[in-house]
Every structure is written in C-alpha cells, then in structure tokens.
Image: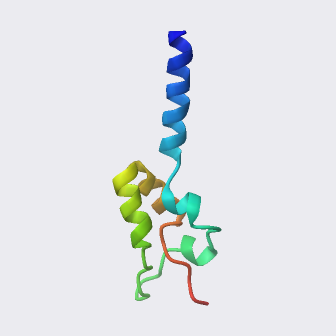
Amino acid sequence: MRSKILTYLFVFMLAVSLSSCATVFGGKVSTCQKTKPAAGEPARDVRVGALIADILLFWPGAIVDFATGAIYKPCDK
C-alpha cells in the first residue's frame, strides 16, 4: 500500500514539474518565438501573466517555458 502511494505521489510530482502555464495554455509555439534575436534586434516580449503564474504556482515551470519559447509573445508578422 505504501509503495502504491509513493508511486502516485511520484507521478503527480513529475506531471506538475513538467507542466508550465505558457506551454500548456499558450497555444502553438511559432518559429519567431523559438528564434533568438540577432544582435541589434529588439528583445522578445514576455507574457507577464504566464511568468507570474509560473513563479507563484511552480517556479521550475518558468524554466520549461523559457526553454520552449512559449513564454514569449507571438510575433505580429
């Protein structure tokens, strides 16, 4: 019984750690969100609401959002 509870707890923690607000709720990540700006180009804008939610709910989610580029606002092209 104890190992079953620990297994469920581990799966839950893994699911929470891999979830992040902008990745889950932000929609499809465009190529301009993934591309790092070149020297002299303006920096990409961050989705402030998703960043605050990541920090308040589970801060490692912010790392996932920045790694995937989902934290950045879509380009207006």
| Coloring basis for residues | rainbow
Image check: 53 left or right of 21? left
Foreground residue, 3 or 39?
3
Question: Residue 74 location in percent, x, y?
Answer: 56, 79
Q: Nearer the viewer, residue 18 or 68?
A: 18
User: Which residue is most to the top?
Assistant: 1
Relative to 72, say whether 54 is above or below: above
Q: Is residue 75 above or below residue 1?
A: below
Image quarter of the N terminus:
top right
Q: Where is residue 68, by image quadrant?
A: bottom right
26 relative to 57 in the view: left or right:
right
Find residue 61 and report its horizontal and vertical position in percent.
45, 52
Q: Is residue 30 left or right of residue 65?
A: right
Residue 47 location (% of width, % of height):
44, 72
How many numbered badges does the structure rendering display? 0
* Residue appearing at x 48%, y 43% in the figure: 17
* Residue drawn where x is 48% and y is 67% of the image: 71
Q: Nearer the viewer, residue 53 or 31?
A: 53
Residue drawn at (55%, 25%) of the image: 8
The quadrant of the rendering that contains the C terminus is bottom right
What residue is shown at x 47% (from left), y 82% (from top)?
38
Q: Is residue 3 above or below residue 65?
A: above
> Residue 63 appears at what percent x and percent y?
43, 55
